[in-house]
Image (spheres, rainbow, N blue to C red):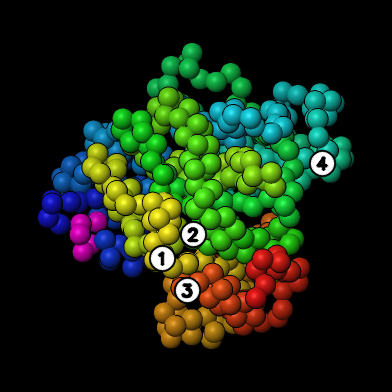
Amino acid sequence: MSKNDSIYGFLNPQPYMKQAIKDMEKNMTVEVLTPETWDDKEIDNIVSVCKDKGIKSVGGFAQKDAFHHILINEKLGNVVPSKLAFFYCMNKYLMRTLESNAFYFDAIDPLNETDDQIISKIKEWPFMLKNTSLSLGRGIFKIKDEEDLKATLADYRKDTELQSLIASQYKSYLKGVPTDQVPEVAPPFIAEHLVNMNEAIEYCYEGYITAEGEVVHYALTEEVYFSNHQALGYVTPPISIDSKMADKVETWVNDYMGKFSELGYRGQFFNLEFWVLPDNSIALTEINPRAAHSYHYNYEYSFGNSLYGDNFKLAAGLEPEADTPWKKWQRNDDYKYTLIVLITGNDTGKVSDILDYDYVEHLEKTEGILIRHTKQRDDVLTEKDMTAAGVMLQQMWIVGDTREDVIRKEHEVRAKIYRKPQENSEYPSYWDI
């Protein structure tokens, strides 16, 4: 197939994706599309543009674009995940109901349950309380006691703006879904077992389901945390397990995603986060109904695969690259290690007072390291911006022939990029060199 026969729509690409688009245009034509709402009129206009330009399919890789991906591709005649399956993906309680042998969890509904009713059914203290609809680490609380719980519930009951936002989103997701198929319980919060992050290791898995319902395994990345549970980075392929674990992961994914396939999740990538616990059992963290955009470079730098390109092909009903990063990892091919280094800020003030931008420019211009600027140098961080993990300032991709190479470089970058040493950033034992 020639380049001119292959035209795809990239939904709302971010600035750091520019090089990826340039690389893909060697084999296909990429048109940038910028839908903003889920309004029928806007979606129809985007679809008309696609048809006029001969765009076969569109791809959305951020959380806000995942529903656009479905709405536009469906009207282009492509196979897409059902809205019911998407709804399950967008509610942390519903997604866990499909997991076999799940650990403790329960639905929490502050608007229809009293504090006493909720407290009476909590089976584990402390526990995690998560808003079922929010993303990017928002709305997640470690609840130590009843006082903690009551304060968090009270905040939600007062936040009518958030309640309205969630209700509006759910209404959009379920538009056209028969009433008898809509789950009776889709709560705003889930209580669940508190995982000991000093013992469990979290992984990020990429896969997809074909139009015929087959689960295909694509790639695996390990999430690395400091001892205070703040995220350090994401390394591909994983370093704490080897490819011998692949069979167990495949079995678990086939079971879990097989249930999503039955719900109608077809023709799309998915991104799973899960823990491997000390006994080597696997427990779901969450599912995202899309490919995770930041891992495109991990797979490209480590294995030479194009996550974005494969996503476009799948959505258009074509065959993605058959030799996936997963297969190459299983075969122990000659791959590299790629680490996304997470640079966060835990102090208020101007970002350029937190990071040394002379060094940042050196990394970008002299060393050629790709950096995604989630905050700009003149941005000012306030207390309202702070989460338990601080504020994400940058992500950068470093590549090495060995795991030791990327660990060594991460140490170097983190030691030089901050204007003052960061507190509470003790490395896990396996990340020391």
In 3D space, how far apart are the residues under numbered discs 1 and 2 (Cα atoms)? 9 Å
**SS type, badge 3:** strand
Q: Quadrant of residue 108?
A: top right
In 3D space, how far apart are the residues under numbered discs 1 and 4 (Cα atoms)? 42 Å
Q: Tag 4 or tag 1, which sits nearer the N-term? A: 4
Q: Nearer the viewer, mark 4 or mark 3?
A: 3
Q: Nearer the viewer, residue 59 or 408?
A: 408
The three-letter code of the residue at mark 4 reads Pro
Disc 3 crowd, CA 10 A, few/some/many (<14, 14-19, 20+): some
Residue on which disc 3 sits:
400
Q: Quadrant of residue 42?
A: top left
Residue 335 badge: 1
CB contact under 8 Å: marks 4 and 2: no
Q: Nearer the viewer, residue 139 or 371?
A: 371
Disc 2 crowd, CA 10 A, few/some/many (<14, 14-19, 20+): many
Q: Nearer the viewer, residue 334 or 105?
A: 334
Residue 126 badge: 4
Residue on which disc 2 sits:
237
**SS type, badge 4:** loop
The three-letter code of the residue at mark 3 reads Gly
Q: Tag 2 or tag 4, which sits nearer the N-term? A: 4
Magenta span: predominant SS is loop
Q: Position of residue 44 (x, y in %)?
A: 27, 37
